[in-house]
Amino acid sequence: MTYDATRFRAYFEHEFSYDAGFRRNVSRFGSQVAIVDPPSGKSWTYAQLGAAVDSAARALAGHLRRVAPALRKNGVNVEFTRGKERLIKLTR
């Protein structure tokens, strides 16, 4: 039997998404280990992983804002939104 989350979405989350699930785990399990790098043994808690994801997203958004004029010149539209699922959308 395959798990199908669609029938539970209305009960648990208004905006059911991977991002919402990740943010929920960061909130609920912030001090617990989320991921481990086996070769180095380094581990990150959900709070640390959430902060790293946010930092990487901000850096990527900043870079794309700087290069957006050149991208637009080459026919690529850059759209920045503040929704939960999409921060940056590139279209040609």
Image (spheres, helix red, strand yellow):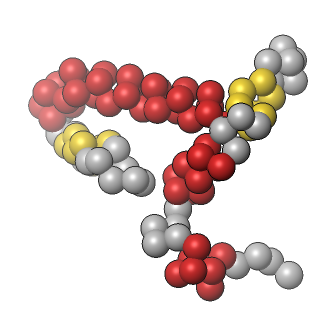
Q: Is residue 7 above or below residue 40?
A: below
Quadrant in the picture for residue 9: bottom right
**Residue 92 placed where, x, y %?**
25, 47
Q: Residue furthest bottom?
A: 7
Residue at x 55%, y 26% (from the top left corner): 52
Residue at x 46%, y 72% (from the top left corner): 14
- State left or right for residue 18 relative to residue 81: right
Residue at x 46%, y 67% (from the top left corner): 15
- State left or right for residue 88 relative to residue 53: left
Q: Is residue 26 above or below residue 33?
A: below
Quadrant in the picture for residue 61: top left
Q: Is residue 47 above or below residue 6?
A: above
**Residue 44 placed where, x, y %?**
72, 27
**Residue 28 placed where, x, y %?**
65, 49
Q: Is residue 33 above or below residue 23?
A: above
Residue at x 87%, y 24% (from the top left corner): 38
For the N terminus, which image quadrant? bottom right
**Residue 31 placed where, x, y %?**
71, 34
- State left or right for residue 82 relative to residue 58: left
Q: How many marks?
A: 0
